Image (spheres, helix red, strand yellow):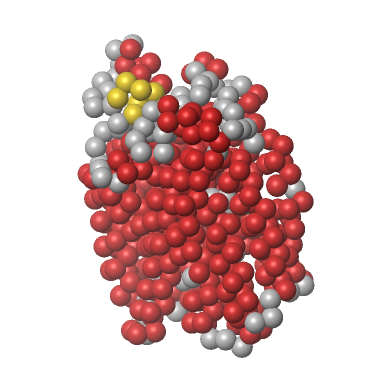
Amino acid sequence: MSVPDRTKEFTSASIIAAVVAWIGMSIGPNSMVSASMSLFIAPLTKEFHLSRTTISAILLISPWTTAFFSPLAGRAIDRFGLRRVLLAGTLLFALASMSRAFVMAPWQLAITFFVVSIASAMNSSVGYAKLVSLWYSHHRGLILGLVTALGAGAGSAIVPQVMRVVIHAYNWRIAYFSLGAYILILPLPLLFFMMREPARSNNVADIRRAEANLPGLTRAQAIRMPTFWLIFAAIFLASMALIGTTAHAVPLLTERGFSSLIGTTAISCFFFGGIAGQLTAGFVADRINSQRVVLPYFLSALVGAMIVHTATQTGVLLGGALLMGLGQGAEIAFAAYLTSRYFGLKAYGGIYSLFFAASNVGIGVGLMTMGVAHDYFGSYRPMTYVFGGALALSSICIALIGPYAYASRRAINTAGAGGLGLGAAKVETI
């Protein structure tokens, strides 16, 4: 398989690939499931006469089922190619989303969430990040940041607002149906006609041979490395603390005296900070060939989360939400980037899917522990220290990872000009 060289990365085919990744990430689980999840809690509770705990348990099916199936989907992507897995996942996601409009009992709702979560694992950022990584090396961080910010980031900010209007004007059933119908009518056909991988056959045997020739480690080799587990732990802990806080942001803040409007505004600031983090992280990663560029973003997440948990003034609170989002957005972008730089492209889908699973498990743990702590202590205050410790440990994990194992073409070119020592980085470029 050939990947366009540095001087020819921006071709019509590679630009189309970036657009495909943008479209795919905009209809992924971050924007279509996680971001709008809280809007459906009240109408579902009323419809089925269930407690908030029971509805929350049903909603938790999403992150944990996605976490379970993500490694399987990642291996399928490496084994059978991107088109087969991503297109099937998008179709299943659309149909399963529409089916939620017709459920008549809680057990039916749980089943539809389970199917949606399987589709989410197939149509996650894992595949689209690999698509970008196959087409780009010199500008990989920038493109990953752009498609993540404009796709998952902007989608997470826009979809909840659209769903809020639809639920208010009609009902939750129409909202779920319209979500799936939109994917079926517009994004799916675009993905079908536009998605291409660099110079590869559609034959499964050819795909496997091409993957075997890519530089990098197998998944079995990667999980034996300490670097893998440091990144895994950092993503798990950060997701637990950041999304756990965001999911409970409105009750967390209203109990401290803020209005629900301020609580909602804080969530919006979090998403806008996330877009900034995704955009700047990719830009910086392409220009500084060092893993240390990740650390300031994780530290900003720590500072921001502590402000959100303790602030008593609106301006300070919103600033903290922006910082928290900055760190969370960069975490998403860096997870995709670090996978390619530490483990290569040979088993990119299988390895990155494990990090994606770590994020989803962390989200579920954060959601649950926030609720349990509030029910037990009558306050969210204890979670300030738990989440603060989790984010501090996450930052330590990032600080301990070593130099990149696989250098970018930009780093190689700079080194050739005498401007950069590559240290332990391998000569292979990806």
Picture coordinates of residue 53 (x, y %)? 49, 82
Indicate whether 188 appears above or below 242. above
The image position of residue 22, as x and y in percent, is 60, 41
For the C terminus, the image quarter is top left
Q: Residue furthest bottom?
A: 49
Residue at position x 58%, y 24% from top? 199
Q: Is residue 37 visible?
A: no
365 versus 236 height, above or below: below
Q: Is residue 166 above or below residue 339?
A: below
Q: Residue at x 30, y 75 (%)?
A: 382
- Image vertical order of residue 122 relative to residue 343, above or below: below
In front of the other: 289 or 253: 289
Residue at 48% from the left image edge and 68% from the top image edge:
247
Left of 349 or right of it: where is 226?
Answer: left
> Residue 253 in the image: x percent, y percent?
46, 73
Between residues 166 and 7, which one lies in front from this camera angle?
7
Residue 175, by quadrant, is bottom right
Left/right placement of residue 9 relative to residue 406 reads: right
The quarter holding residue 161 reads bottom right
Instruction: Place residue 357 in its image quadrant.
Output: bottom left
Outermost front residue: 205
Circle count: 0
Residue 418 visible in the displayed image: yes
Most foreground residue, 36 or 98:
98
Q: Find residue 119 and report its horizontal and vertical position in percent.
A: 58, 57
